[in-house]
Amino acid sequence: MKGVNLLLELTEGARADAEARRAELSYEALEERARAARQPIDVAAALAHDPGHTHVIAEIKRSSPSKGALAEITDPAALASEYAAGGASCISVLTESRRFGGSLDDLRAVRARVDVPLLRKDFISDEYQLLEARDAGADMVLLIVAVLQPERLRELHAFALDLGLSALVEVHDPSEIEHALAADARILGVNTRDLKTFEMHPERFAQLRSQIPAGVVAVAESGVSQLADVERYRADGADAVLIGEALVRDGEPQKRVREFGAVR
Ligand SMILES: O=C(O)c1ccccc1NCC(=O)[C@H](O)[C@H](O)COP(=O)(O)O
């Protein structure tokens, strides 16, 4: 399947890049540094349902496999400041370099500039990558159920929590929700992008929402291009929306984040 193959390719590439960094900095040395880094923020609390407001997770995304180049972001920290000023509840920093053009340096630069919770958005399959996330200032990491065996998902989720990190556990279908909940996910993201065709299926969020228990943060990911899309996800029960392309292409990201966040 093209989509699964793409996810595997992205995951393998991210793992190879992390292995190269590990050759420069050992696991043990990184762990010592990571555990001494600032204490992460509790992101589940920051994204908990708010009747007066939709939490916006605003993404820093230069390019993507589906669209190619999206925006020339020379100063990710400046864009993050705009997002924060617009009231973003969390900022997602894509650190994958091969297809998304991101880096851990982007994450570090953003951390140095803003105080809002940060998501390290990458294709994580190894503990070393979780240590890197905490060391670079992340509060939350992405774990994609489609590329992790159930036991591996449980291990990585538990290790993230042990490091004080939160985890956004990403699902695409009902069986993946079961695996996510079995791993004790507290923040669940439904990605409505079909990774086989790259088509958007916003109705998937509503289809899966009833399987997400009360008390678990429900995030609708991908495909927001206008206010009506946020209103729809909100009406379908989203506590938070994760938005990339629409914000990086917008000339007024601060204004746009404020507008999207005002949806109730
Ligand atoms: O964006 C892609 O083309 C993509 C392809 C394969 C795997 C992941 C991909 N995107 C990651 C994301 O989850 C999105 O960046 C995020 O949900 C924001 O989506 P959007 O608002 O549609 O840019």
Image (cartoon, rainbow, N blue to C red):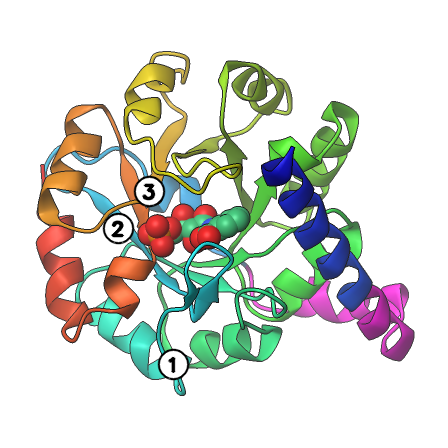
Density class for disc 1 (Cα within 10 Å; few <14, some 14-19, many ≥20) is: some
Measured as percent of width and height from the top left, residue 60 is found at 39, 67
Tag 2: amino acid:
Val
Q: In front here: 109 or 123?
A: 123
Residue position marked by numbered label 3 in the rendering: 47
Tag 3: amino acid:
Leu
Density class for disc 3 (Cα within 10 Å; few <14, some 14-19, many ≥20) is: many
Measured as percent of width and height from the top left, residue 17 is found at 77, 67
Residue drawn at x 33%, y 31% is 201
Residue drawn at x 32%, y 83% is 78
Task: Based on the picture, tell me whether residue 217 belongs to the magenta stretch.
Answer: no
Question: Disc 2 beta carbon < 8 A from ligand 1?
Answer: no
Q: Which residues are magenta?
A: 19-39
Quadrant of the image containing the C terminus: top left
Residue position marked by numbered label 1 in the rendering: 73
Q: Earlier in the sequence, mark 2 or mark 3?
A: 3
Q: Look at discs 2 and 1 and give the one toward the viewer.
A: 1
Quadrant of the image containing the N terminus: top right
- Is residue 42 in view? no
| Element on which disc 2 rests | strand
Tag 1: amino acid:
Ile
Residue position marked by numbered label 2 in the rendering: 56
